[in-house]
Image (cartoon, grey):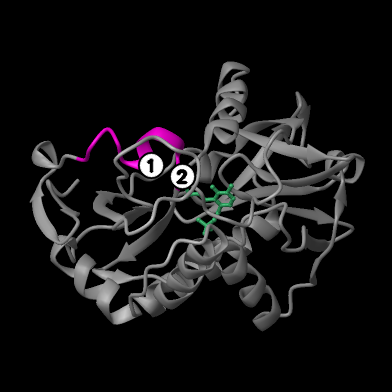
Amino acid sequence: MSDTVYLNGDYLPLADARISVMDRGFLFGDGVYEVIPVYNGRLFRFEDHIRRLNNSLRAIRLELEKSPDQWRGIFQPMLDGDKDQYIYLQITRGCAPRRDHGFPEHVVPTVFAMCNDIKPFAGRLTGIKAVTLDDTRWQMCHVKATALLAHLLLRQEALDRDCAEAILVRHGYVTEGAASNLFAVIDDELITPPNSHEILPGITRDVILELAQANGIACREDIIALEALQNASEVWVTSSTREIVPVVELDGQTVGAGTPGPLFHRMDQLLQAYKQSQA
Ligand code: PDD
């Protein structure tokens, strides 16, 4: 991890970065964030991440106008061209003199960014176990909000059951993972739930949909009933930091042959080639 972080206009060592206990991010989780991969020193799908950031800011009524180039200028000094990294960017509504639920006037948002190494996730190649759990989150899951307590409880419940991810279920159909989007191969077709307020519009998800379309892989966005997921020949979860991760065991039952499936291998190759082409 780069020791230098960005906080409100300054670059400083992580150990010296300080915010007030009155920051609304600390008191209320009143903020949004982004996680942007960096390959070979180049920010991956950067404009898409900034567009999603702006949508999140708008959704929580936080006004902060910066162009993609201004953000790029902020991140650039923290990047190391030789490593796979990701930028973590967090923006909170800032500090108010009093703790009050209503939005304060004339506050300056807190802007924090750091750059971490992407650690290869072992489960990406071996596959992982996952468990389905009730989606206990709120009605604005399309917003990348820092208030992640429901996600954390769900992920921890999965870990406690020796699983790497929780797959979330609302009204009998699956939405996404605790920190990932979801794909299933059903009757040789790749299916992912449609974007809505029930899921985060994942950037990795978009890339996979584009790659499927460009390479003649049958693919559609549709709701997936829990029962259909349990009978899928492949299940994947996807995110910027872990890429495509095959689920080989779901609720204690083997998925497909119990190993990463053929479409996973194909899509993973396509994704690696696409990353190279962008880096
Ligand atoms: N999370 N859904 C949720 C709830 C997520 O938290 C994430 C990613 C995704 C995948 O989105 P993307 O492909 O844009 O990374 C879907 C990040 C990595 C995190 O919170 O660290």
Horizontal side of 28 relative to 65 (left or right) equals right
Q: Circle 1 is placed at which residue position? A: 25
Q: Circle 2 is placed at which residue position? A: 146
Q: Position of residue 23 (x, y in %)?
A: 31, 41
What residue is rendered at 68% in x and 42% in y?
138
Mark 2 crowdedness (10 Å alpha carbons): few <14, some 14-19, many ≥20: some
Asked whether 274 or 10 is in front, the reply is: 10
Relative height, residue 114 to residue 259 (above, below): below
Q: Position of residue 103 (x, y in %)?
A: 46, 50
Q: Position of residue 245 (x, y in %)?
A: 57, 47
Horizontal side of 271 relative to 47 (left or right) equals right
Relative height, residue 94 to residue 209 (above, below): above
Which residues fall within the magenta stretch?
19-30
Asked whether 178 or 188 is in front, the reply is: 178
Rendered-image quadrant of the C terminus: bottom left
Ligand 1 contact, mark 1 (Cβ < 8 Å): no
Residue 184 shown in magenta: no
Q: How many badges with numbers are in the image?
A: 2
Asked whether 178 or 126 is in front, the reply is: 178
**From this viewpoint, is residue 259 visible?**
no
Q: Secondary structure at mark 1?
A: helix
Instruction: Tell me whether the residue at label 1 lies in contact with that at label 2, contact meaning CB atoms closer than 8 angstroms.
Output: yes
User: Callout 2, which amino acid?
Assistant: Thr
What residue is rendered at 51% in x and 45% in y?
124
Asked whether 224 or 66 is in front, the reply is: 66
Per the rendering, the mark at residue 116 is none
What residue is rendered at 82% in x and 40% in y?
170
What residue is rendered at 45% in x and 61% in y?
62
Q: Position of residue 267 (x, y in %)?
A: 61, 64
Residue lying at the far top in this picture: please name it. 160
Relative height, residue 169 to residue 48 (above, below): above
